[in-house]
């Protein structure tokens, strides 16, 4: 065999070997599936529902659907491969609750107490969150040929600002006109459960501190995403926010002696609101020496040897709220990786 024949045979073997590699190439593999990485932006329309002390019933998952309130959201997400996405979002919306509209006065076990309590609130939530989501169906193709739809689960961490408010009544507890009558007033600075008062050892709420208006929460839930075209997805989600505060509604512990509020007539009026719908049935002298006519069980300090008190709320369960979302997502692009043949 001549030298030219040997070189030609070697070239044929190299071409055949290279063709075989090309036919069997499946792309570079990695744990994240980096050949499918891309980013996206989204806008969402949300519905907020509140679960807490001002729900119709004491059950953990009791809520008043009539108080569903809207929220809007913006998001930026980054997809790390066939299944995983990390999304940063901002949401703004309102929570609402009111005893006199939600509680059933005919329910002698629970509803009548809540109806007589007559508390209400609104809370405008501003939330920043980062959540990780995992798809049930992997996307084994590029973003252009992604799966038609997939369910997913998500969980993460959020920080939010909240500021519970309520509408001030026309008059104070003595029947005098209130300057803030009819206005939505901030409740946290008033310390409606004695947070800013000097409480004595043995008082029901002794040691209580003002709650923070910046809090953290844990978002979690499920959703389903649908491919509309090459660049648009539509998602539907049901999520919850597990909170580390019981004051999303400004209600958590026991009534305090109205005398601890001193000359702050607005704080007294926002702490005890039963008198707006029912006449008082007895009078007591407060710590400030002033007489207060209240309904028994409401608006006054009471403790017994067994630790029972006139409850304003229940401190045993933290508040939560639900977020139902419809989100439209626009895909910005993906990271392309050049195939390498060896």
Image (spheres, rainbow, N blue to C red):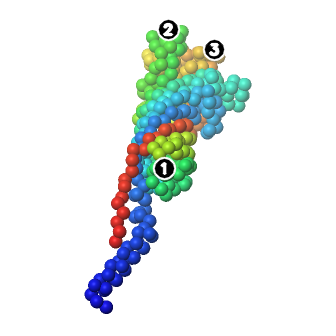
Mark 2, other Cα within 10 Å: few <14 / some 14–19 / many ≥20? few
Indicate left or right for 203 with 63 as reference.
left
Q: State if disc 3 and disc 1 touch (CB < 8 Å).
A: no
**Total numbered circles:** 3
Residue 336: image quadrant is bottom left
Q: Is residue 279 above or below residue 111?
A: above
Spatial distance from mark 3 to mark 2, Cα to Cα?
A: 18 Å
Q: State if disc 2 and disc 1 touch (CB < 8 Å).
A: no
Question: Is residue 273 or residue 195 the one in the foreground?
Answer: 273
Residue at image position (72%, 25%) is 106
Instruction: Pick whichever of labels 3 and 2 is earlier in the sequence.
Output: 2
Q: Position of residue 339 (x, y in %)?
A: 36, 63
Spatial distance from mark 1 to mark 3, Cα to Cα?
A: 54 Å
Q: In front: mark 1 or mark 2?
A: 1
Question: Is residue 289 or residue 333 the one in the foreground?
Answer: 333
| Disc 2 secondary structure class | loop
Q: Position of residue 166 (x, y in %)?
A: 50, 21
Residue at image position (56%, 33%) is 49
| Disc 3 secondary structure class | loop
Which residue is tagged 1? 133
Which residue is tagged 3? 279
Question: Is residue 96 or residue 318 the one in the foreground?
Answer: 96
Q: Is residue 57 visible?
A: yes
Which residue is tagged 2? 177
Q: Position of residue 304 (x, y in %)?
A: 60, 33
């Amino acid at each position: 065999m001549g030298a030219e024949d040997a070189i030609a045979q070697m070239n044929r073997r190299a071409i055949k070997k290279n063709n075989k590699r090309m036919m069997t190439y499946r792309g570079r593999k990695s744990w994240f599936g980096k050949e499918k990485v891309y980013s996206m932006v989204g806008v969402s329309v949300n519905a907020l529902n509140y679960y807490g002390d001002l729900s119709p019933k004491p059950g953990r998952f009791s809520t008043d659907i009539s108080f569903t309130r809207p929220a809007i959201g913006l998001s930026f997400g980054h997809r790390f491969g066939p299944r995983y996405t990390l999304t940063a979002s901002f949401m703004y919306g309102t929570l609402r609750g009111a005893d006199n509209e939600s509680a059933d006065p005919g329910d002698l076990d629970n509803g009548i107490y809540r109806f007589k309590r007559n508390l209400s609130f609104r809370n405008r939530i501003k939330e920043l969150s980062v959540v990780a989501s995992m798809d049930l169906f992997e996307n084994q193709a590029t973003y252009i040929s992604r799966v038609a739809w997939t369910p997913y689960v998500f969980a993460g961490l959020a920080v939010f600002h909240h500021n519970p408010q309520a509408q001030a009544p026309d008059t104070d507890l003595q029947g005098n006109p209130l300057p803030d009558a009819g206005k939505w007033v901030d409740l946290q600075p008033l310390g409606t459960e004695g947070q800013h008062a000097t409480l004595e050892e043995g008082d029901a709420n002794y040691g209580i501190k003002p709650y923070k208006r910046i809090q953290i929460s844990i978002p979690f839930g499920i959703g389903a995403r649908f491919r509309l075209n090459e660049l648009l997805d539509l998602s539907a989600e049901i999520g919850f926010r597990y909170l580390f505060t019981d004051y999303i509604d400004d209600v958590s512990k026991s009534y305090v002696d109205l005398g601890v509020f001193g000359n702050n007539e607005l704080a007294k009026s926002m702490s005890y609101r039963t008198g707006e719908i029912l006449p008082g049935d007895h009078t007591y002298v407060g710590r400030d020496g002033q007489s207060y006519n209240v309904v028994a069980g409401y608006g006054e300090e009471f403790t017994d040897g067994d630790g029972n008190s006139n409850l304003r709320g229940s401190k045993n369960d933290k508040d939560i709220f639900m977020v139902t979302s419809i989100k439209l997502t626009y895909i910005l692009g993906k990271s392309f990786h050049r195939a390498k043949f060896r």
